[in-house]
Image (cartoon, grey):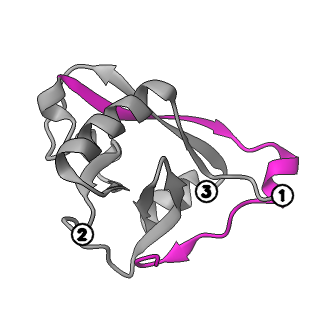
Amino acid sequence: MEAARIDITPKATQVVDQLREKHGALMFHQSGGCCDGSSPMCFEKGDFRIGESDVWLGAVHGCDFYMSEDQFEYWKHTHLTIDVTPGRGASFSLEIPLGVRFLIRSRLFTDEETKHLTPVHQGEHN
């Protein structure tokens, strides 16, 4: 059985459901920049152009999750969980008007999980 690289909390799924109702299909992207660039950002599917240097880590709650290749190199040994917290980030992420922002919680993979990790894909995943 494959071990997922990315997960989402119940609170974050509620926010995704609110956003999906208003915007339709969604996706996440996390760049390797500082400040908000290191936070996961939620976009309408297709509004953010995925490049060859982006890595698809999997899907959470029906949303593809991509990360810049440079950021993935630092985090490839960690399980990531999308969560939300009150407050406003300074990004273009869709949750901002709701008074919350997405964030990543991480932990190292166990040895057993590492043996069964979901494969990643470069560029857009279909």
Left or right: residue 81 versus residue 101 is right
Query: Crowdedness of circle 3 by 10 Å Cα count: few (<14), some, many (20+)?
Result: some
Quadrant (top left/top right/bottom left/bottom right) for the N terminus: bottom right
- Magenta-colored stretch includes residue 80: no
Q: Residue at x 34, y 38 (%)?
A: 17
* Mark identifier at residue 83: none
Q: Nearer the viewer, residue 21 or 12?
A: 21
Secondary structure under tag 3 reads loop
Q: Position of residue 126 (x, y in %)?
A: 46, 78
Mark 3 → mark 2, Cα distance in angstroms = 25 Å
Q: Position of residue 121 (x, y in %)?
A: 54, 75
Judging by the rendered image, the residue that carries numbered circle 3 is 76
Which amino acid is tagged 1? Answer: Met
Q: Position of residue 56 (x, y in %)?
A: 49, 67
The earlier-in-sequence mark between 3 and 2 is 2
Q: Position of residue 12 (x, y in %)?
A: 41, 31
The earlier-in-sequence mark between 1 and 2 is 1
- Magenta-colored stretch includes residue 110: yes
The earlier-in-sequence mark between 3 and 1 is 1
Q: Nearer the viewer, residue 58 or 108?
A: 58
Judging by the rendered image, the residue that carries numbered circle 2 is 46
* Mark identifier at residue 1: 1
Which amino acid is tagged 2? Answer: Gly
Which amino acid is tagged 3? Answer: Lys
First to last magenta residue range: 99-126
Q: Residue 108, located in which quarter of the rendered image?
A: top right
Q: Residue 64, located in which quarter of the rendered image?
A: bottom left
Q: Residue at x 34, y 21 (%)?
A: 85
